[in-house]
Amino acid sequence: MKRIGLLTSGGDCPGLNACIRAVVRTASYYGLETVGFIRGFKGLVDNDFKILDYKSVAGILQRGGTVLLTAREPRFKDYQYRKKAYENIKKLGIDALFVIGGNGSFQGAYLLQKEFGLNVIGIPKTIDNDIFGTDYSIGFDTAVNNAMEAIDKIKDTTMSHERVFIVEVMGRDSGFIALEVGLATGAEITLIPEYPLPLHIVEEKILKAKSMGKGFAIIVVAEGVASAKELAEILTQRLKDKDIGEIRYQVLGYIQRGGSPTAYDRIMASKFGVFAVEKYVAGEKNFMVAFENGSVVLKPLEVSFGKIRVPNIKEYEINNILSL
């Protein structure tokens, strides 16, 4: 029986288990055995694994996180440890390694292909949705919905007390979460790393909302732009004589990455997993799964290297048009 390897690497996100399930069950359908490595690349180096079969992935579709666990593995940067990982892979009789990860994970896996000729397949996941070469990454929809639900609750208090509320969402280098959450919650202002607004524009938007009869305002800020706490302190000082009420803040943090995946993430994760295995069975090598123009497609793994996907400026303009 042919074997494939499977691991989850990088930050966790909702939908990983749905993808694991899809890979394992599709592999089983085609007569392949799946070896799941524990804690990502660390499991490759330490030869820490378990055999996954049809039954072992039952009941995980709706679970957040990853049953295979994930961890950072700085040792993998050294050739000697990559060689050790490859030797472990070959001893197990693995023909291809499926990596559910992001840009960094893909680059790490690509080294195994480049240095040792291993067949590597990448499946994109990140709540930031910024992997270059694909329009969608597993986990994004759930993260947006998690943030939206939290802000909806905050908005009730904000409206009742007539406050300005700054909510910090994840997105160190990417504004996709902030953009979609800002649009979905009717935020007055959305701040993202790709299109930073000068502070005086933020002030003007708050004052404009007040002049139009709105007693409250929601500001969504991606963490890569500014700290919500610092922004609240600065705006409080600069607008202290403008009668806009209190300015409060909230950092949503890791709640965005947790919880049961949405229906969309479950479906996309399942489609990605099935597609990846079927293309491997058909003889394809060293590719990443991508979602483009409404279809799941195959691309060279290295397409994602050295770049990140950025929002379309039109989406940003729509957000600002609807904010007031």
Image (tube, helix red, strand yellow):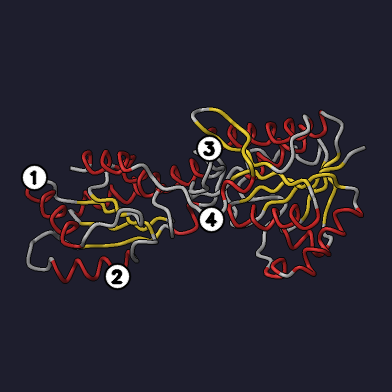
Asked if residue 295 lies left or right of residue 17, the reply is: left
Q: Is residue 66 above or below residue 314?
A: below
Task: Using the image, tell me which numbered label, if any, was put on residue 306.
Answer: 4
Dot 3 falls on a residue whose secondary structure is: loop
* Quarter that holds the C terminus: top left
Q: Residues within 10 Å of mark 3 (few under 14, many from 20)?
A: many
Residue occupied by mark 2: 230
Q: Separation of disc 3 and disc 2 at Cα?
A: 33 Å
Q: Relative to residue 230, is residue 110 depicted above or below?
A: above
Label 2's element?
A: helix
Few, some or many residues within 10 Å of mark 4 (<14, 14–19, 20+): few
Q: Secondary structure at mark 1?
A: loop
- Which of marks 2 and 3 precedes in the sequence? 2
Compute the Cα span from label 4 to label 1. Answer: 45 Å
Type of residue at label 4?
Gly
Q: Amino acid at mark 1?
A: Met
Q: Tell me the tag on residue 262.
A: 3
Is 207 placed left or right of 97 in the picture?
left
Q: In the picture, residue 281 is in which quadrant?
A: top right
Relative side of 30 to 303, left or right = right
Q: CA distance from mark 1 to mark 2?
A: 27 Å
* Residue under pointer 1: 212
Q: Earlier in the sequence, mark 3 or mark 1?
A: 1
Q: Which dot, 3 or 4, sits closer to the camera?
A: 4
Q: Could you tell which of marks 1 and 2 lies nearer the N-terminus?
A: 1
Label 4 or label 1, whichever comes before in sequence order = 1
- The N terminus is located in which quarter? top right
Q: In the rendered structure, which amino acid carries the disc numbered 3?
A: Thr
